[in-house]
Amino acid sequence: MHNLKKKVENHYTNNNLLDAIELALKEQGKDLNNLKIEDLNAVDEMHSRGVYATNELIKILDANKNMHILDIGSGMGGPARRLAHQSGCHVTGIDLTASLTNIAQKLSKYTGLDKKVRHIQGDATNMNIFENDSFDGAWSIHAAMNIENKSAYYKEANRVLKPNSKFIIYDIFLNNKEANIKYPMPWAKTSATSFLINKSEVEKYLKNSGFKIIDIVNKTKETIDNFKKIQANKKKTLLLAEIKMGNDAKTKIANLQNNLTNGNLAVNLIVAKKM
Ligand SMILES: C[S@@+](CC[C@H](N)C(=O)[O-])C[C@H]1O[C@@H](n2cnc3c(N)ncnc32)[C@H](O)[C@@H]1O
């Protein structure tokens, strides 16, 4: 188990990533000490449909300035910053990968959001740094597919939330047999660090952990359409994808796109509430 988490962390660790982001921003004439969150739109959202999806989630979460929201598997912190910026709430992001957590802290400082958003390195399946009933809401965006111990993941999310608060999951789900999926994918080089499950299994985990499901929306079509749209802007898009995902970014994106198009995978947005 420990070894598996190390492998997941290694997948997301790129010690040149911050330098590459800073260089790309400087080349666009941006002042690093005075960045707007929009300046990071193309780099700090590590999930399908990026900013479009995050904006949808922000609306659904409907947080306000008195709330403290948890982002589970928060990556470089793009969704957490956008949420804090738009809703005025405080956000804590927790992520397994130390280097992404460091980048998240830097980018929050650059955008002046470090007073509202904090980033902690930690494991979603054991968040004992947080007390029971700590947060007014939570989301988890494209992270569960790297997490083997689903039961602990959902139970921990439930434990740290206050009763009646929302938990939003925006993730990639299995529609078909794992054996049909072609890797590498953006989140895993091989199936060894990919733990995809189907919608009914997720529903079961949520219910067994003390959540009530409010809504499930299939976002697969929007995701496929978005891939087509960004491909119209090919050169720029590929460069940014390579900064984030490495030089096999093109293959990873093509594999995801094909698996969504042929129905092996789906993108779902689930809104649940802690009972
Ligand atoms: C595809 S990225 C998504 C990042 C972020 N949610 C976003 O959308 O920009 C998946 C993230 O999940 C994190 N992750 C994987 N397993 C985790 C675990 N057990 N606990 C916390 N974070 C984890 C990875 O480190 C990575 O940053």
Image (spheres, helix red, strand yellow):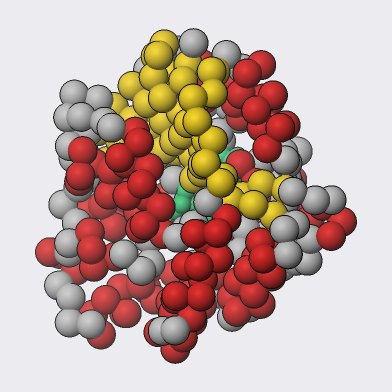
Left or right: residue 216 versus residue 258 is left
Quadrant location of the N terminus in the rendered image: top right
- From this viewpoint, is residue 24 visible? yes
In this rendering, is residue 69 above or below 263?
A: above
Q: Is 152 above or below relative to 56?
A: above
Residue 9: x percent and y percent? Answer: 60, 52
Horizontally, residue 5 falls left or right of residue 63, namely right
Front-lying residue, 170 or 219: 219
Instruction: Name the residue: 45% across, 12% down.
Output: 132
Q: Report the residue that reaches farthest toward the right.
A: 179
Vertical comparison of 269 with 266: above or below:
above
- Residue 80 coordinates in the image, percent (x, y): 33, 45
Q: Position of residue 219 (x, y in %)?
A: 53, 51
Residue 55 in percent (x, y) is at: 32, 49
The mark tally for this picture is: 0
Q: Please, is residue 255 above or below residue 121 in the view?
A: below
Closer to the camera in the image, 195 or 272:
272
Residue 99 seen in this snapshot = no
- The structure residue drawn at horizontal position 37% and vertical position 26%, both measured from the top left corner, is 137
Between 273 and 137, the residue placed more toward the observer is: 273
Q: Quadrant of residue 10?
A: bottom right
